[in-house]
Structure formats: structure tokens, C-alpha cells
Amino acid sequence: MRPLSELSPGEARGLRGVLFDLDDTLLSHGRLTLPAYEALWSLHDAGLLLVAVTGRPSGWGEVLARQWPVAGFVTENGAVAFRREGRGVARLDACPDDARRARRIRLARLVEDVRGRVPEARLTDDVDLRRSDVTWDVGERVALPEDRVAAVVRAIEEAGARWSRSSVHLHATFDPDDKASGALRYCARELGLEAGAATTTLAFVGDSGNDAACFAAFRTTFGVANVRASLGRLTVPPRYVAPRAMGEGFADVARAILERRVTA
Ligand SMILES: [Mg+2]
């Protein structure tokens, strides 16, 4: 990883937008701080397209895509997205309704299986807002011991589901997407940017293991300083690292991009 100060004016000027993770990237321990929100608006006011790419529920995306200065929200690690439409939003789910219903029934069975095998594993408090996945709390409100996390992972794998892990949640899904495939589908269908254009003209900012696919897919990638704790889970680290952590690190990234675009 290179320090953020090495971002060149040419690379900053070539950007059309910024994709960003929420937890421990834009949000600091779950809170949206004033510097982070101002940074978001400053990127928007400079004409950059903004798209959140998060493991958080589709219910969050449906609300926040209406309120924040973003073009869209990709939620549930790529499975379900929202675009602004007038004063409302449109939901974009690549899975047809009948297949979605069948997957939700299988997820409900998995939840019951885990309840029997790892009774101390708690579902997250945002699970009812989810459409394509279920999530257990591994570090948000409780710290689940690693051997118990491994037991939940075993149950997920035995059910034939996929799992991924953020700094706070363990996800199980029968959907094929990851953050990068979901983000690239959104960029192609909603922004008219095919993969080659999207990965070279959109930056990505993230912090943890479930950002791995985006760090690998996009050319201009930034980690907030706390990404260092997750480097063991990243096959490709972010290209640049911010001096500060979480929301303050996001503000560092925004300032670096905007200053170089002005002075270039
Ligand atoms: Mg994160």
C-alpha cells in the first residue's frame, strides 16, 4: 500500500465517481460523523458519482438512497441495489421473485439449524431488513468467540450456502454475488459504465475482508487506516492507505481526490 499523499493529480482527475463501503469506512463504529458526511457532500458537489457498496441490509439502502447525495446503493454484499428515481427509489434484484422466495425458505432452515448447533450465536439486529442473506453478530453488539464463529461457518457450508465476513457480521447467502460483481452490475445497468470503464474510472474505498473483491477489481482503491487489521484477509491490498481510520480516513481520501482535481 502506498501513502495517500502519492495519489497523482492525473489519477484523481480521471475519476468519474467513488464507490464506498459503510461500516468502519464511511461510518465510525456505526456512526455517521460530521466530517464523513461533509466529505460525501463535497465529492457530490464536485460532480463525482457516489455509490455505496455495503453488506448492510436492502432496507437500509431503500431509505438511505433517498436521503444521501448518492446515485445508488448496492446492499447485501452485491445482491440487491437501489437507484434514485425521482423523489423515490427503484429496487434492483437480479434474482426473480419465485427463486428469491425459495432461497429465503432455505435461509430460514439454516437459521434454525444454527440455533440448535450454536445457541449462543445471535442474529444481527438488522436481519429483518434483509432480502437475500441472513447475518449473525460476530463483533457489533457481542464478540462471538472464534471457535463459535467457525461452528456457524461449518453449518453454512453444510447447507450449501456461501459465507462472508465483515468487521461486524457473518453473512450467509444462496446468492452468487460479491461486492464487486454487484457493484459492476449496478454500474453497467444504471450508470452505463461497462466493467472496463467502471473499474478504471471509479475509485473504491473500503476497510475489511468483504471488500476484497472490490480491492481486486478496481484500479484506484483506498483503504482507511484500519484496513491494516484486515490485510491477512485481502489477496490484493488497496493501492493507497489513508493516514486516519474510519470516517476520518474517508474524509482524508475525499480531500486528497478533490485537492488534486483542482490543482491539476
Ligand atoms: Mg467495512
Image (spheres, rainbow, N blue to C red):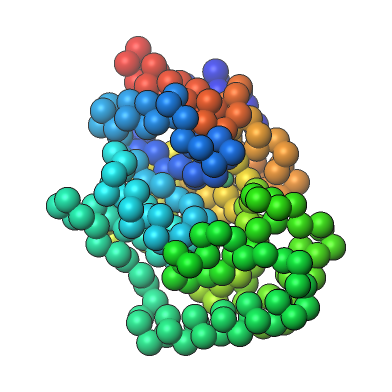
Vertical comparison of 258 with 20: above or below: above
Q: Nearer the viewer, residue 144 or 13?
A: 144
Vertical comparison of 111 with 205: above or below: below
Location of the N terminus by quadrant is top right
Position of residue 45 measured from the top left corner of the image (x, y, whole percent): 26, 28
- Quadrant of ligand 1: it is top right
Position of residue 262 measured from the top left corner of the image (x, y, whole percent): 32, 16
Residue 14 in view, yes or no: no
Q: Quadrant of residue 162?
A: bottom right
The residue positioned 76% from the left and 63% from the top of the image is: 149
Left or right for 24, reference 36: right
Position of residue 208 measured from the top left corner of the image (x, y, whole percent): 63, 46
Total marks placed: 0
Vertical comparison of 7 with 113: above or below: above
Location of the C terminus by quadrant is top left
The residue positioned 42% from the left and 80% from the top of the image is: 100
The residue positioned 37% from the left and 26% from the top of the image is: 38
Position of residue 72 measured from the top left corner of the image (x, y, whole percent): 32, 50
* Residue occupying the far left of the picture: 86
Q: Quadrant of residue 115?
A: bottom right
Q: Nearer the viewer, residue 214 or 124?
A: 124
Vertical comparison of 99 with 255: above or below: below
The residue positioned 76% from the left and 67% from the top of the image is: 120
